[in-house]
Structure formats: C-alpha cells, structure tokens
Amino acid sequence: MSTKSMPPLQPINPQTETDRSVSIDPAILYFGTPVVLISTLNEDGSANLAPMSSAWWLGKSCMLGLGARSHTPANLQRTRECVLNLPSVDLVAAVDQLARTTGSSPVPDYKQAMGYRHARDKFGLAGLTELPSTEVAAPRVAECPVQLEATIEASYPLAQNDPARRGYLTAFEARIVKVHVHETIRLEGHQDRIDPERWRPLIMSFCQFFGLGGIVHPSRLAEIPESAYRPPAEVSSEVA
C-alpha cells in the first residue's frame, strides 16, 4: 500500500478555474467498499465461502452485487439465506487465500481464463473456523468480528438494457436477521453499538486491499443518537 501523503486541497474559484476532471472508461467501479465473506450451503450440505466487495447496507437491509454465473448466486437462489462475514484488516491474508477460487466444478471456461481453481473446503484453505448460526443453516466465520445472518428477500438481474452485460450480473436484497460481533469492537457502556474507532474493516478499492485510518473530522451525523434510526415499532435495548 502506498504511503504517499495526499497534497492539500486547494479551494476552487469557479470564476477562474478550468475543469480538472478527465473522461475515462474504467472496467470496474470499485471505489471502496467493505470486503464480505459470504457463507452459503452447497447442494450436498457442505459450506461454501466466497469473498466479495459489492455490498452496501441501509438499515437492516443489504444489497449484494454478484456475477450471475458464479457458485454463490446459485446457492443464494436455492437456499434463500447466507451469512455476511466482515473480516478485519488482520484477516487479509486469509481472505486473499480465497482469491481466484470457486466452488464450481468443473471450473467455468471464463474463470479458468482468469486463473481460478476449484476449492471444495474453502474454510480449510483460508484457515478459518466454521461456527453454527442461530437463524440460518449457513455457518458463520468465527474469526470475523462481524457476522450477519441473512435471508434473501429478492433478486434482480442487472444491466438489462446493456447488451454487452445482460445476464452477467445479479443484485440480491438480503434482510439481516441476526447480528453477531466480537466483544472487542462493542462500544463501551452500550449493549447494541459498535465502536467505529475499534472496528477496522478490510476495504477493497479497485481490487486492492486497504484499511481505515483514524477519524479525519468530527461528524455532525454522529451527534444523532444511533437509536433514533430504529423503526418506531422496534423497542430499543440500548444501555445509556
């Protein structure tokens, strides 16, 4: 990872400045999202574990973007459940062990061309430990500080109006039904909050691994009590 410091931002004067941007056509748009290890069950009942990073959360809902022809989407469509395990930066070597592996056998031609190989025991390959879940059949990853049991609410084919990409991408809407976290990242004095200064998620940006730094500026949004985001029907179990 580069240690170069960013130059200080200079204010833009719209009266005198020209457009600093240029037009490009990148093959991917992974500007920076958390790495997720998705655990699912194969048809024979064994566990599959797949790293991905096209995921975002809103409330207790999560959207997952996956290649439609991969093994994990097939498991999600069949079982309608999974666990979203979020690794911390210290698990990067284990996550990288799973890169370019697939649960599909035989390995599809397009993945063979990208250097993928079949791996049946991905937990063993990465040196990770299976933990039973409480609400779904798929196992959790014991070493991940955040483990989110989820059910699949819906799936949506993406890029339907793009002939070059139609049929290759799928988005899954997942509903989080149980949250497990390591005690080490829980906010002191609170039952149901995570301490963002202790939690160091592994981030992927343009296929490279990164980690978070410290807080760069106080946030006005952080002044709002986190319990305010709960739906009115939920009873907060927050400890003041």
Image (cartoon, rainbow, N blue to C red):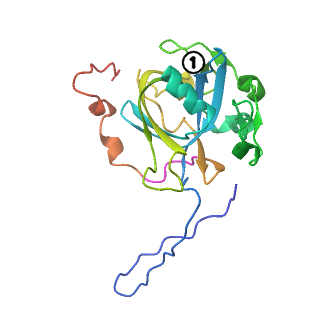
Looking at the image, the residue that sits furthest to the bottom is 16
Is residue 213 a member of the stretch shown in magenta? yes
Question: Compared with residue 182, is residue 173 higher up or lower down, i.e. above or below?
Answer: below
Number of numbered callouts drawn = 1
- Please tell me whether mark 1 sits on a helix, a strand or a loop: loop
Residue at image location 74% in from the left, 23% down from the top: 121
For the N terminus, the image quarter is bottom right
The answer to whether residue 115 is left or right of residue 62 is right
Regarding residue 146, the answer to whether it shows in the image is: no
Residue at image location 37% in from the left, 49% down from the top: 219
In the picture of the structure, the residue carrying the numbered disc 1 is 138
Q: Magenta stretch: dominant SS? A: loop
x and y percent of residue 189 in the render? 42, 23
Region in magenta: 212-217
Amino acid found under the numbered disc labelled 1: Ala
Disc 1 residue crowd, few under 14, some 14–19, many 20+, Cα 10 Å: many
The residue lying toward the viewer, choosing from 138 and 188, is 138
Find residue 15 and report its image quarter.
bottom left
The residue lying toward the viewer, choosing from 30 and 41, is 41
x and y percent of residue 24 in the render? 54, 70
Is residue 108 a member of the stretch shown in magenta? no
Looking at the image, the residue that sits furthest to the front is 163
The answer to whether residue 113 is left or right of residue 33 is right
For the C terminus, the image quarter is top left
Residue at image location 46% in from the left, 75% down from the top: 10
Regarding residue 137, the answer to whether it shows in the image is: yes
x and y percent of residue 70 in the render? 61, 36
